[in-house]
Amino acid sequence: MKTRDQDRSENRITRRQALACLAQWSGAAVVWTVSGGVPHALGATRGDAMLKSAGGGALMFVQISDTHIGFKKEANPDVDGSLRRAIADINALPAKPAFVVHTGDVSHLSKPEEFGHAKELLQELRVDRVHTVPGEHDTIDEGTTGYLRHFDHDGNGKSWYSFDQAGVHFVGLNNVENFKAKTLAALGDEQLAWLKKDLSSVSHSTPVVVLAHIPLWTIWEPWGWGTADSAEAIALLRPYGSVTVLNGHIHQVLQKVEGNVALHTAMSLAYPLPTPGQAGIGEPGPVTVASAELGKLLGTRQVSVVRGRHELALVDTPLDRA
Amino acid sequence: MTTRLSRAATGTALTMLVAIALAGATLARAAEPSQVTITKFAFAPKEITVAPGTKVVWTNEDETPHTVASGDKSFASKGLDTGDTYEHTFDREGDFAYICTVHPFMTGVVHVKKP
């Protein structure tokens, strides 16, 4: 159990990273690379230079997050349009991604028509498939039942799953449902037991990519920005040489590295949220910015697995890059 | 027992009632509903005391959806979008703790007791 001071100390670091990242948004894409446990932001344009210097990727996929289909408030009256712009960006990539992952809050209110419309929009992606994990906005009225009617990836009625692609083991998790009053949401014992069993057949030299909506580290507890039992999941992942955790939920790019485990949150495609515990803002609600600024705060992430490197190459690209 | 009202059914009258409730009139008479506003990811007032038979009406004023769900599962709303309301009539005495299931850090209590 961490003390409040430790949490605050970690938070100061992540906020600094957030500010550094915001500064980089004035250029084109932000390219994060991790060497020796220290994250560096490279000032490349759309990351092409870095990916070339890395010798080409063995596997490339795209992460999108927090589309909130059905949201139509001032902070973004056209979330459909934002998703369509992202889809156009992804379809225009010089190399076709292996697939797209969506790290949750597909819908805003878990309504059947929102899931249906989101699925229609996602079908405009020219990729073989889209993997999703549920966000808390996808499980509002009936748990994962409505979500799974549209996004049951392996047809077994569970919102968590795994698959292998190009020598990489992918795990999708649900960390938005198990909670008690005043606590963070959790993965829960059933899912942790499944994860342990799932990983038992995966060699420690296999790169692992984990998808989960809420960050698997505590960013800001008063706003629910963390997972109560994330330490148990990370303990299962720690023996692996390369672990990359991709999260959404907080609508901004933050990163934490713990040994071989790198945790990254992504931009939303709907609206910005405050920085963690931002002064003057008491709650994690949508932030309305000038319409010309919105596209700079929404975006997609290209993820490349590069042979011979245990860090994945990440390129965060806002919708508006000028 | 419970009904969702359209957002149009609420309005300035509701705002006035909320203002009265916030001013300290937490012990409502059974004849009129008590109001709880959901704003800035919090229930206001966080605790409310009513007489048995009182209807409590929650109104979500946030741009983010919230729910009202009791710990003992005796009442639970569907997702409330901006302006949506949820109401529940409390017939028996007791302390009814509830949360927003989308944001479990949001908590409130309805105390039901005879005046």
Image (spheres, coloured by chain):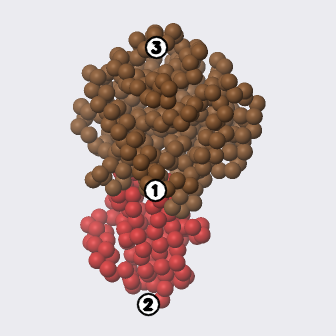
Q: Chain of mark 1?
A: A
Q: Is residue A65 above or below residue A84?
A: below
Residue shown at 45%/29% (left/top)? A38
Residue indicated by mark 1:
A4
Between the C-alphas of marks 1 and 2, the distance is 41 Å
Residue A207 is labelled as none
Q: Considering the image in quadrants, where does the C terminus of chain A appear?
A: top left
Kind of residue sitting beneath label 2 = Pro
Kind of residue sitting beneath label 1 = Arg
- The residue lying toward the viewer, choosing from A63 and A72, is A63
Nearer the observer, disc 3 or disc 2? 3
- Is A53 situated left or right of A240 in this image? left
Residue indicated by mark 2:
B115
Query: Residue A33's spot in the image, x, y percent?
Result: 45, 23
- Is A301 situated left or right of A151 in this image? left
Question: Chain A rendered in what hue?
Answer: brown
Q: Residues within 10 Å of mark 2 (few under 14, many from 20)?
A: few
- The residue lying toward the viewer, choosing from B39 and A164, is A164
Question: Chain B rendered in what hue?
Answer: red
Circle 3/circle 1 CB separation < 8 Å? no
Q: Residues within 10 Å of mark 3 (few under 14, many from 20)?
A: some
Residue indicated by mark 3:
A51
Residue shown at 38%/45% (left/top)? A12
Kind of residue sitting beneath label 3 = Leu
SS for callout 1: helix
Q: Residues within 10 Å of mark 1 (few under 14, many from 20)?
A: few
Residue A280 visible in rendering: yes
Between the C-alphas of marks 3 and 1, the distance is 39 Å
Residue shown at 56%/27% (left/top)? A130
